[in-house]
Structures are given as structure tokens and as C-alpha cells.
Image (cartoon, helix red, strand yellow):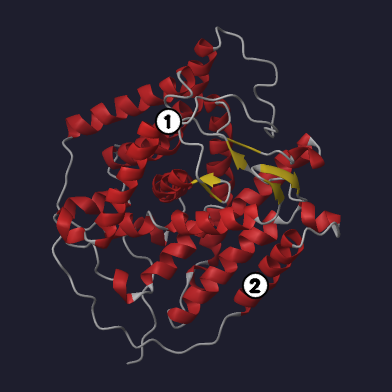
Amino acid sequence: MSETRKISIILATIAAIIFLPLWGSYIHHNGKFPEGFFAYPMLTYQEKAGFSWPIFISVAILGFVVFLWYLFPHWFGFQKTSPPPPPKVVRVKWPLWFWIGLAAWGASVFLLWTKSNEPLWFLHWSDFPLFWGLVLMIDGWTYRRNGGKSIISERPQEMVGIGVSSAMGWMLFEYLNFFVDDNWYYPFGNIIDREMFLLYAIVISTGLLPLSFVFYELFNSFNVFRNRYTKGPKIILPELLKTSLIVICLASLLGAGLYPDALFFSLWLTPAMLIGLVLDKLGIWTPIRSIGQGNWRPSMVFALTYLAAGLCLECENYFSGIHNGREVTFTQAPAYWQYNLPYVNDYHLFEMPVVGFFGYMPFSIYVWLWWIAFAYIQGIPSVFFKEKAFEPNTVE
């Protein structure tokens, strides 16, 4: 198959993610969207299906099984492995960008968490130094642990590319959020005007997807992950099953617009599944392909990245506001977010319903797959077209 045709199929896949929920929602609303349906940012929550103990318990049980899978992989068909001897890594100083990130992140956290009112221009753009500051800090930590190797030190141009792709990859989710009746919203988004908020959202979202990659390289620097999950069940899906799953994903995208409460979870699952399946059918490497050789490490370790990043972001978000119960009465962060999920919107950790954190795991995989698709379309070479990007500098 020619490269042009492969790129066309990837673009058609992204178009399906964009237009199928729109079509389903158009049918759901009898051909006329409610007034303000596409208003951005979403300032208030909509009425959703109430809390359901059976659904909450089912999701919690599923999450507990995943927890056991990570902790005791031999229970699930993985061969037991022992960590290799830890490498003797060259000792290096903390890099300059770590301290820049610490200063940017620290200033943002200090001003937001102390509920400051000045400088207002900084507070209204605080998520940019907050997100990128965390990226620089985590990468600097990896640099020190790897003896002078990290994404920024080795491939700074790729970090810029990931940042550009991040703006598109995340704003796609902001768009999809319309069709599940706003699973999250921004109650203080009106402290700046709508046009400024849109620009703000695009700019700050450049720092969201890079978080997964810097956390991945950090996790890889720990000896416990070096060969863990590398000898698991070898699962290769038949081509007919892959095709059937693609059809199911397409139907799910349409269905999310038709049944926004019942299929709200597909917002987090379907884009990653569809992009991954299409890339695999085109013969383009993805971390999922390694599972066919029994190596689950790339997927399983990367799935943890946005769980870690999400905990950081949810914590930073929550403590930037003053709370009266579940109501937020003050913040100077325009993008302060809250959730409005059907069936499970109780028992929160920060603003997130506790079982909602499991949604960060498939989102992590989406991050890697989105970057592969984006880079492939642009012809950008990437170290993340393989299982492991960097090896540490070691003492001979």
C-alpha cells in the first residue's frame, strides 16, 4: 500500500471520530441542536442520569482486577521475571530546564493555592507554566536518573512536535465532550472572554500530551520496570476480528451522540481503540503490536503515565479553588474544571469521581497512538516508533 493511501486512511479515521458523534447527536436532537449546545467553554453542568450502585461497583471491581493484574501479573499468565542488575549510571547534575520548570510550576502553584488576586495576567495564564513546568521537571528528573539522557536533552525538536500534536489531540476531546452533554465543564471560564478562553485552551493544551512521554521515560528509568510484563500471553487478533472491532468502534462513535449517558465512557475508549486498530491494519508499529510477541511492557507501563499525570493535574486543579462542599466559590484559574458524569458522580478524589481515574489509562494509550498517527502523517521521525526510546548512560 502506498504511503499516500495510508495517510488518507488515517485522515479518514480522524474524520470519522469528528463527524460520527456529530451525526449521532444531530439525530438525537431531531435535527436541531439546542441553543448554546456548542458554546465554549461549558460553564454549567447538565442534568445526567443519577448515581447507580451496580454500575459504580462494576467499574470498581474492574479497576481492582486491573490493580491485581499490575501487582501480580503471574496470576494472569505472565511468566515470573526478576529485575536485571541495576545499571551503574553516570552521575550528572540536575539540568537547567529542571530548575526553570520548578520555578514556573512553583510560582503557579503558590499563587493559585494561596488564592492570590495578583498578578492577574499571570493567574489567568497560569496553566501554561503549570503544565509545561511539570513537563520540564519530570524530564529533568529522568535526565539525572539516566545519566544525561532524556527527551529534551536528546530530541528537543520531538518534544516540540509532541506539544503541537497535543493541542490538536486534546482539543479533539474538548469537541467530543459536546456530544456526551459535557462530562466536564469550566464554571469560571467566563472570567475571561470566550475568544480568549479558546486561545488559552489551545495554548495550555500543548503541555498535556507531553506529560505522558516524560512520565514514561521516568518510569523506564526505574529498574522494576525494565523487564516486568515482558513475558506475557501472546495475543494476536485475527484480521477478521480487527475489522469487526473497527466497525464496532465506528458504531460506538455514532452511538455516543445518540445515547450520551449510556455511552459516555466511549469518549475515553473508542478513539484509542479505533486509531490503534487502523494503524495496525496499515502495518504501522504501535505499542499494542508488541503484545503479539508477549511483551506487554510498553502498553502496560505507558498506561500508567496519565494516571500519574492525572493525579498531579487533579490535585493542582482542586487546590486552586475555594470550596464550599462540592461548590467552588473562588478561583482565578479560568480552566478550573469539574465533572458531571452519569451513574458514578459520587465519592470524589479532588474533583474526579474516584472510579473516573481508570479512564486515564486508555487515555494514556490514546496519547501514544495519537502521536504515532500525527507524526506519520507529517513524516516526522520519532524515537517513539519503537518499544523503548532511551537507554541510560552507564559507567564502563
Which residue is drawn at the image coordinates 85% and 56% (left, top)?
117
**Considering the image in quadrants, where does the C terminus appear?**
bottom left
* Distance between the alpha carbons at the discs numbered 1 and 2: 42 Å
x then y, percent, for residue 235: 16, 47
| Vertical comparison of 22 with 294: above or below | above
Which residue is drawn at the image coordinates 34% and 47% (left, top)?
63
Going by the numbered disc 1, the residue's amino acid type is Ser
In the image shown, does 247 or 321 lie closer to the viewer? Answer: 321
In the image shown, does 48 or 119 lie closer to the viewer? Answer: 48
User: Is label 1 in contact with label 2 (beta carbons under 8 Å)?
Assistant: no
Quick check: can you spot residue 293?
yes
x then y, percent, for residue 366: 42, 45
Going by the numbered disc 2, the residue's amino acid type is Leu
In the image shown, does 367 or 285 lie closer to the viewer? Answer: 367
Which residue matches tag 1? 52
x then y, percent, for residue 136: 59, 68
| Vertical comparison of 205 with 345: above or below | below
**Considering the image in quadrants, where does the N terminus appear?**
top left
Left or right placement of residue 86 versus residue 323 in this view? left
Of labels 1 and 2, earlier in sequence is: 1
Which residue is drawn at the image coordinates 46% and 90% (left, top)?
91
Q: Which mark is drawn over residue 102?
A: 2
In the image shown, does 358 or 47 lie closer to the viewer? Answer: 47
Q: Secondary structure at mark 1?
A: loop
Badge 1: residue crowd in 10 Å (few <14, some 14–19, many ≥20): few
